[in-house]
Image (cartoon, coloured by chain):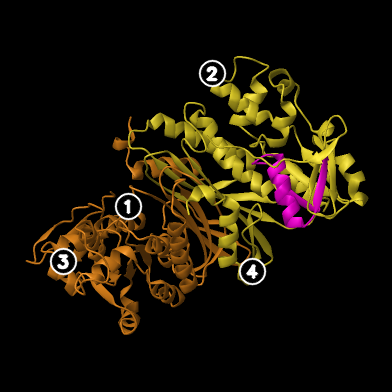
Chain colours: A orange, B yellow
Amino acid sequence: MKLKRLSEGELISAIRKDFSKKRPGLVLGIGDDAAVVKVGKIQLIYTKDLLIEDVHFITSHQPAYFLGRKSLNINLSDIAAMGGKPRYALLGLGVPSGSERRWLEEFFSGFQSAAQESGVALVGGDISQARKITISVTLIGEGETIIKRSGAKPGHHLFVSGTLGNAKQGLLLLRKGHSLGKDKKADPLLKAFLDPLPPLALGQDLSRWRLASSMIDLSDGLSVDLSHLCRESGCGAEIYERNLPLSPELHIWQRKCFDFALHGGEDYQLLFTVPTRKIKSICRLQQKYPITYIGLMREGKKIHLIDRRGKRRLLEIKGYQHF
Amino acid sequence: MKLKRLSEGELISAIRKDFSKKRPGLVLGIGDDAAVVKVGKIQLIYTKDLLIEDVHFITSHQPAYFLGRKSLNINLSDIAAMGGKPRYALLGLGVPSGSERRWLEEFFSGFQSAAQESGVALVGGDISQARKITISVTLIGEGETIIKRSGAKPGHHLFVSGTLGNAKQGLLLLRKGHSLGKDKKADPLLKAFLDPLPPLALGQDLSRWRLASSMIDLSDGLSVDLSHLCRESGCGAEIYERNLPLSPELHIWQRKCFDFALHGGEDYQLLFTVPTRKIKSICRLQQKYPITYIGLMREGKKIHLIDRRGKRRLLEIKGYQHF
């Protein structure tokens, strides 16, 4: 059997089965946004991501500085999705032997700026040769109340942070030759793709006040990530197309903006569920953060979309395609 | 300036300068075998390694099962070099889309066998597409008394575990078409390269009884790794060529066996220093582990080799060349 026919999901299931024996101290293993391990009284959150040139990014689209920022920030997103505080990072870097020193300096400068903004210390890593630029970041965070993917119940309300679909449109514009700082109407979209800023503070507030029953970050697209949340929680859901938060810029550039919001990927916003009795607190939180109500958790396994015309249909689950 | 002219050492210095601000909880940052962070009363040790096909390994030489084992075990080696206990692993894997499912299953089977042997739980990671197989392992350990690279003083005695140079000869034999299980005289060398077993228990004993003043694992070759230890400790050293521990098999296959022991790389043994007053304890430890006395730490910065003819000369520092 070739890998093409073996989905990441199947593979993860196989690995999870192999490795899922309970360990003292292991709070949460493979399958959530990050792993959680209890050390003394403190819960540590571990996450890692592998970015490979021409698979996850192409250097002609992504300036080194922004790539440095993004390689840290997409890991921050996993920590944000558990309500944790990021602390330490390890960076593994593979670079082709002909790389420009300037590229590396800009990459590190970007990585460092993102680390400073989020209070992360780079504590180790390694550098080696590679044919293609290969970036492997491990991020270590801490959290008191960890928000899992699995806590949603039928009747809980679905919320997302920020706006959706911008990153995919940003990538399209980059492919068409657009670049940052030349068109005010394009910049927010380009920025969403090049320099996503996960809502860390929101994640931490949701955790501190125990407002969210489940949470996931939106990396593969709303439909795919919602399906993960539903599977882990053992629920279905319905979402209201009309409610999806879209930026004015996406409306300008993209006729299929609802499709982009549903399936775009790389938004690095938070999707979370809230029990009815805590809705008031979320309303207060809306004064501080952009949060939008988009649907409801349901009994069963099905995920429905109530479309703009009010018609109810099964939500198609299709995610972001890498290069 | 191109990367070819920018050594890993220079790059690490540049990054270290950028990121070296002291952090609460950060015990040991970039520059040692691993990073150490204090969480409550417990010291956590973090290490990571990036392995890329055709740079660090080639699949025709390394069966998937052994590659799985080695990708965990070379990280164990960093934990061993600090006297720590390995606990949790994260695995990032990039695989070409045409990969055989069997290759992946054997890789995981190997990874799992090594994890079980050392008591490590795989708690997370991610899988993605890549042009070349890319393996990124993060290992998390715990340690009470951390042994750094920087504690050696002039007069301390130098020891190594196991035998040296086997792995390089094993690689040569693989390149010539040898494979495991066909020639008893070749097997220990092939095994040394394909399936290194870092002396974890020795590292922990040295830590528990506070016997070693400094320690490093031998990944790049004795000469290179000794130079790291000397630099971090601010000492010179002299080593006795006659004392270098060589396996009978290396003698059979390789005329330049002393060169292989000095510069071979990938031995994943431990190099450590011991103050005179603790030599007795090391002698007792020699009943339990293969440990060899190979030299002495000296004032200054120079590293000398006393060669087999008794002639004293500067040790050439040259390490392992990747594929």
The quadrant in which residue B231 appears is: bottom right
- Position in image of residue B93 (x %, y %): 44, 44
Q: Disc 2 to disc 3, how far (Cα)?
A: 61 Å
Crowding at label 1, few (<14), some or many (≥20) Cα neighbours within 10 Å? some
Crowding at label 3, few (<14), some or many (≥20) Cα neighbours within 10 Å? some
Q: For the residue marked with disc 2, what is the amino acid?
A: Gly
Q: Secondary structure at mark 2?
A: loop
Residue at mark 2: B177
Crowding at label 2, few (<14), some or many (≥20) Cα neighbours within 10 Å? few
Q: Nearer the viewer, mark 3 or mark 1?
A: 1
Q: For the residue marked with disc 1, what is the amino acid?
A: Ile
Q: Nearer the viewer, mark 2 or mark 4?
A: 2
Decide which of A222, A92 is in the foreground and name it.
Answer: A92
Q: Secondary structure at mark 4?
A: loop
Residue at mark 1: A58
The mark that comes first in sequence, 3 or 1, is 1
Q: Secondary structure at mark 3?
A: helix
Crowding at label 4, few (<14), some or many (≥20) Cα neighbours within 10 Å? few
